[in-house]
Amino acid sequence: MSETDRNSSSGDGGSSGLRQTAIEAYDSTLDGASAAGRRAGDTIGEAPLVALGAGIAAGALLAALLPTSRRERELLRPYGDRVTGAARGAADAARRAGSDKLRELGLTPDVLADKASEAAKATAQAAIGTFKDEAAKS
């Protein structure tokens, strides 16, 4: 009888014990993976937009963690420049439209400053009046 046969038949926990531990670990891992797959399927079925958002977030995280190659930078630079230019153009157009609308409503910086000053004066006068009234009662 070989040494391996003796260890497995003697029940001393030799290679037989290691084999059994490995089988149990494999089964446990397989059960855990199956359960995780079922839970993921249930989540996707119940809230597909949440699952989509989580997938996008995970992809963005992985993309942020992986360094970009020189070739990727060369290929993507024109698209990035175009997106940046379009965003700047949209922000400028929104700023101009907002400014035009405020001017149309008579809300120029000078008018707003005057109104803020008037409001501050009225608030201060009301506070002083209340303080005087309270001081007179004491």
Image (cartoon, grey):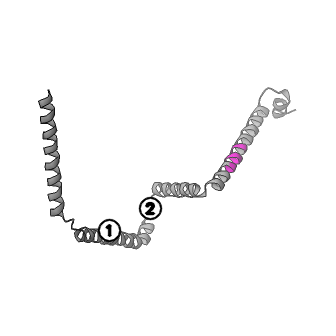
The vertical placement of 130 against 120, above or below, is above
**Residue receiving disc 2:** 68
Across and down, in percent, residue 104 comes to: 24, 71
Across and down, in percent, residue 136 comes to: 11, 31
The vertical placement of 93 against 135, above or below, is below
Residue sitting at x 67%, y 53%: 41
Viewer-proximal residue, 70 or 12? 70
Q: Amino acid at mark 2?
A: Thr
The CA span between labels 1 and 2 is: 28 Å
Q: Secondary structure at mark 2?
A: loop
**Residue receiving disc 1:** 91
Residue sitting at x 56%, y 54%: 50
Q: Amino acid at mark 1?
A: Ala
Q: Is residue 42 magenta?
A: no
Q: Secondary structure at mark 1?
A: helix
The quadrant the N terminus occupies is top right
Residue lying farthest to the right in this orientation: 1
Secondary structure mostly taken by the magenta-highlighted segment of the chain: helix
Residue sitting at x 41%, y 67%: 73
The vertical placement of 71 against 116, above or below, is below
Residue sitting at x 31%, y 72%: 93
Across and down, in percent, residue 116 comes to: 17, 55
Extent of the magenta region? 31-38
Mark nearest the camera among 1 and 2 is 1
